[in-house]
Structure formats: structure tokens, C-alpha cells
Image: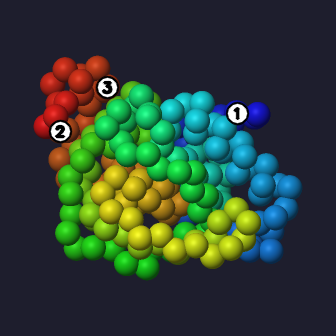
Amino acid sequence: MSLLKVARLGHPVLRKIADEVDPGEIPSEKIQSLIEDMIDTMREYDGVGLAAPQVHQSLQIAVIESHSNPRYPKAPDIPLIVLINPEITHISKETDDDWESCLSIDDCRGKVSRAREIKVSAFDRTGEKIFLDAVDFLAVVLQHETDHLNGMLYLDRMKDMKTLAHMKEFEKFWEGK
Ligand code: ZN
């Protein structure tokens, strides 16, 4: 198991559009061990998703997983998903506002408006094409992670920066709102 250093807000790698992975390179040791290390890093820091730019690799790779996560106690279980070169093929007009946080933006949470439903196509870690049709929490995580691959952070999506809060203050003043 290998843990990777997480790039924090202000690091330029978080603001670059990540490079596509050559599908022929997906089975390579370099890409496979990066994916393994991203999964380990996401689990270690209780993330529900992690994008390669967050570990200083400007590549279109993201991992997603959620199992009784202490940072998101109400989140449904999501089995491990590995996305390479994801493409959004449909995004609903209907939106929901909910709280998001990010391993690259320590100890903060803010309210973000996201499409309720999203369809994504991508390669999985074996190089197979996958198609995801997601609603609610998974749709939010997919939008958050694909944003990372395009140099965007949830802060850019916030309608009202006044909802940005540190975790302790979130729990005290904003929980349930
Ligand atoms: Zn993030």
C-alpha cells in the first residue's frame, strides 16, 4: 500500500485540464499502480472520491467509493468505481443543493448546486468502456470528480460563498440546513 501526497488548494495542478490517458496505456504498470495508490489514498483519508490531479498527476483518472464514511455519514454505499477519460453524455436541468467538501480543501464544507442526474461514459481500469447513469449522491460525486479533471473545484460552483464553513462551524451552525 502506498499513500500519495494530496495537492491542496492553491497548487496549480488542481487548476489544469488533465491529459487524457491513451487507452493502450491503461494496462501499463504506471497507470495500474497509480490507480491502486489513488484507491489507498482515498480510503486512508475517508474520501468518497479522488481525482489524479489531487495527487499531482495531471491525468484523466478518478476513483469513487463509499462505505459508511465518517465524513458523509448519510451517504449511500457506492462500490468502487474507476473512471478513465470520463465524458459527461447527459446532465439534467433539474438541480439539487447539497454540502460538499474536498480532500484538497482541508476542513471546509460549502453548499453547491449540482445536476440531479448525470450520465457518464468512461474506460474502467481494465480498459473496458463503462456507462453510468447516476442520480443524487453518486451524481454529485461524479460531477465533483469530473470537475477536478477540468481544473475546477467545488468552490467555483458555489452560488453563495457565505455557506463556506469550517467543519466544526458547519456542525454547529449549518448541519441539516
Ligand atoms: Zn475534491
Toward the viewer: 50 or 108?
Answer: 50
Residue at 19%, 20% in the rendered image? 172
Local secondary structure at mark 2: helix
Residue 147 vertical position relative to residue 24 in the rendered view, above or below: above
Q: Amino acid at mark 2?
A: Lys
Left or right of 101: which side holds 14? Answer: right
Rendering coords of residue 99 (x, y %): 27, 43
Q: Marks 2 and 1, Cα distance to the nearest angstrom?
A: 34 Å
Question: Viewer-nearest of labels 2 and 1?
Answer: 1
Q: Amino acid at mark 3?
A: Met
The crowd level at tag 1 (other Cα within 10 Å; few <14, some 14-19, many 20+) is some
Local secondary structure at mark 3: helix
Pointer 3 and pointer 2: residues touching (CB < 8 Å)?
A: no
Residue 157 vertical position relative to residue 115 in the rendered view, above or below: above
Residue at 47%, 50% in the rendered image? 78
Task: Decide which of tag 1 and tag 3 comes sooner along the chain.
Answer: 1
Give the residue number, with chain letter if any, for mark 1. Answer: 3
Give the residue number, with chain letter if any, for mark 2. Answer: 162
The crowd level at tag 3 (other Cα within 10 Å; few <14, some 14-19, many 20+) is some
Place residue 59 in its image quadrant: bottom right
Task: Decide which of tag 2 and tag 1 comes sooner along the chain.
Answer: 1
Give the residue number, with chain letter if any, for mark 3. Answer: 167
